[in-house]
Image (cartoon, rainbow, N blue to C red):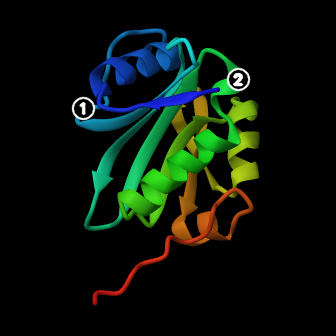
Amino acid sequence: MIQFVYGQDVAISTLVAKLVSGSEANSYGRCKTIGVVDNKGRFLGGVVLYHYDPDSGSIQMTAAGLNPSWLSRRTINRIGDFVFGECGCQILRVDVREDNTRVLEILAGIGFTFTRVTRLGGRKLDGVICTLTDDDWYASKLSHGRPIKEEAA
């Protein structure tokens, strides 16, 4: 069974940066992370949430794992609950290299919308800006539905 780890933002964002780019250079700046570990505490994967803009309700995400089991339905739900419920965001953005078809398929299954951008990944590498709105998240089969807001007494 997987467990989530919080409060280890520097360590988790550095691990994710190394998995994504092969370098320990961590350019996420101020961020929040969700680590995923197995029942023995071994790191399986992590999510880095950064470029949070409360005024526009937007946040950007990068994620990576050592083992495909880290990205379970439970993990996807945790990400959605955090981004849309706890942070109150109205849009989540993920930038993906155009040749990363596995990740693009996963994001399509969640309900992300894609916009291809020339040279987003570099001079000779196009990319895709993937976005998910709170409306699309709550309408998806993966969501638990909109959180119920209790009215003040």
Q: Is residue 112 above or below residue 126?
A: below
Residue type, mark 2 in image: Pro
Q: Residues within 10 Å of mark 1 (few under 14, many from 20)?
A: few
Q: Residue 66, located in which quarter of the rendered image? A: top right
Residue for point 32% across, 38% down: 32
- Quadrant where the N terminus sits is top right
Q: Nearer the viewer, residue 106 or 82?
A: 82
- Is 130 placed above or below 150 here? above
Q: Earlier in the sequence, mark 2 or mark 1?
A: 1
Task: Report which residue position mark 1 lands on.
Answer: 29
Tell me the tag on residue 2. Answer: none
* Residue 111 percent coordinates (x, y): 69, 58
Q: Determine the residue positioned at 29% across, 37% down.
A: 31
Q: Please, what is the three-letter code of the amino acid marked with disc 1?
A: Gly
> Up-down: is 69 above or below 151?
above
Horizontal and vertical percent for residue 146? Answer: 55, 72
**Residue 106: where, in percent of width, then height?**
72, 41
Dot 1: what SS?
Answer: loop
The residue that mark 2 highlights is 68
Callout in the foreground (2, 1): 2
Q: Nearer the viewer, residue 141 or 64?
A: 141
